[in-house]
Amino acid sequence: MLNVRIIPRLDIKGPNLVKGIHLEGLRVLGKPEVFAKYYYEQGADELFFQDTVASLYDRNSLHDIITKTAKEIFIPLTVGGGLRTLDDIRDVLRAGADKVAINTAAIKNPKFIKEAATKFGSSTIVIAIEAIKEDDGKYYAFTDNGREFSGEEVVQWAQKAEEYGAGELLITSVDKEGTGEGYDIELIHMISNAVNIPVIAHGGAKNPSNIVDAVINGNADAVAIASIFHYSILKEMQSATDDYKQEGNISFLSSGAIPKKIETSSISEVRTALLKSNIPTRF
Amino acid sequence: MGKEKKICVIDFKLGNLFSVLQALKNTGLDAKISTEVQDILDADALVLPGVGAFRDAMKNLDNLNLIQPLMDSVQNGKPLLGICLGLQLLFKESEEFGLSKGLGLIQGRVTRFNSVNSEGNARKVPHIGWNQIHSPNNSSWSSSPLDKTQKDEFMYFVHSFYVDPAEEVVLSETVYDGQRFVSSILKENIFACQFHPEKSGTNGLNIYNRWAEMNKLK
């Protein structure tokens, strides 16, 4: 097993870092650049930026954030959200991203994966799968932040994405995302065992032992983590939230409320938990 | 005060050179990305970066008429830093898509990771992530850009192919799922690594810095 990667995930809306539940109900947490720098200094293995709005207007502000970040942060940066054309991918790579994550455009046209992988290399292309378990007990891939049903069963879709040239898969459990109920192990395990490319588990982590679980029982190669780390930083430095622009829901900050289920941890605490369970990770 | 040394990052129109350029600037070097023959000839040192396919890279270098000036510069002693595909391109040939011809500055070939490991289980390819660089037989890294790097330090890798040198150039080795492979080489004025020092945090930046200092570029 290769060293498990710890990837802080930053959801971006306009100029702000946000966090929601089930990919909805976004709260503003602060400036993404501040959080990104902090994670770099704490020893994150990579960073993942997701543009939650992905409109043309917001795209420029995302590019600014990426460029500013890439100038002082020397670990891999992945950017996702609303990338629909080869030009969109090229622009975000030029802004300083190393990899891109694609969901909607790939489901609508799987050949887009092949085109993108051929042009930019497979290892640049991450396919993001937003999974929801339906009443028939099967998991299906959704698009547009978990809002639109695609009809694609996740395992078949994951295998097709691999076949078309995806370099990695980011699996988000929309059901668990932001809830602190733990990863959807069944989902992660099912996909990990069906493909031969790295799988990044995302959605639901409450504490380091959930993360250990995603690796041992889900066979994840990497974990994307938001709440555990973001709220940990907020606890430490309330000043990070001082002078951001007002956009979205900021009322909760004044109350200092952190979702009850989340047990905040630092990156090194997560690493320690992995190493204690004999899971290899960078130390 | 001497004139500031110029670094040319050779652009063959594949992949993302932003982080390589940022790392060189962060090291305090005057670097620029170029596809121009004259910039290669004028530079004090060259960086051959690269993400993407071996054959496309060679084809693009050829179409841009960059192969000859690159070869002449390196054979005349100009320092060259090769990164990832930029390491692989230095070799004689690659097994990617049949057999593709490389620059041939180093004897040996480029091979793909087997998708089955020695225990018969599936090996995930590409090799993506952080892995350690070891010194073969615990040999010394002094007089190389790794001289300030700790043995067994972690670096960031993204690749499906690795180099198999047929001459004594190995500086470090790395093991991926049971497969030992060469992760950096040093041959006179050529230093090249399979990992991405510009993506390996401060330890990686330190390699850029030592490469620059050793070649008196700063």
Image (spheres, coloured by chain):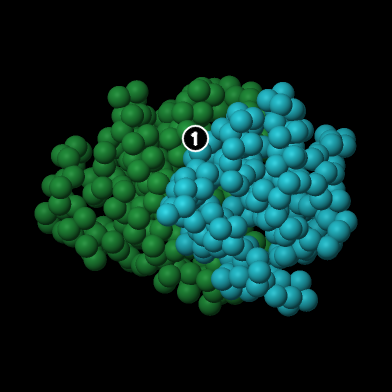
The residue at the point 71 percent across, 26 percent down is B65
Hey, what amino acid is under mark 1? Leu
State the residue position of label 1: A93
Q: Is residue A168 visible?
A: no
**For residue A81, above or below residue A213:** above
**For residue A167, above or below residue A266:** above
Nearer to me, B12 or A45: B12
What is the residue that sits farthest to the front in this orientation?
Answer: B1
- Residue A161 position in % (x across, y down): 64, 35
The residue at the point 40 percent across, 46 percent down is A71
- Helix, strand or loop at disc 1? helix
- Residue A281 position in % (x across, y down): 56, 67
Chain B, which colour?
Answer: cyan
The residue at the point 75 percent across, 58 percent down is B187
The quadrant of the rendering that contains the N terminus of chain A is bottom right
**For residue A66, above or below residue B132:** above
Nearer to me, B64 or A74: B64
Chain A, which colour?
Answer: green
Choose top left, top right, bottom left or bottom right for residue A12: top left
- Residue B144 position in % (x across, y down): 65, 66
- Residue B51 position in % (x across, y down): 64, 40
Q: Is residue A86 left or right of residue A119?
A: left
Nearer to me, A13 or B142: B142
**For residue B218, above or below residue B17:** below
Q: Is residue B138 visible?
A: yes
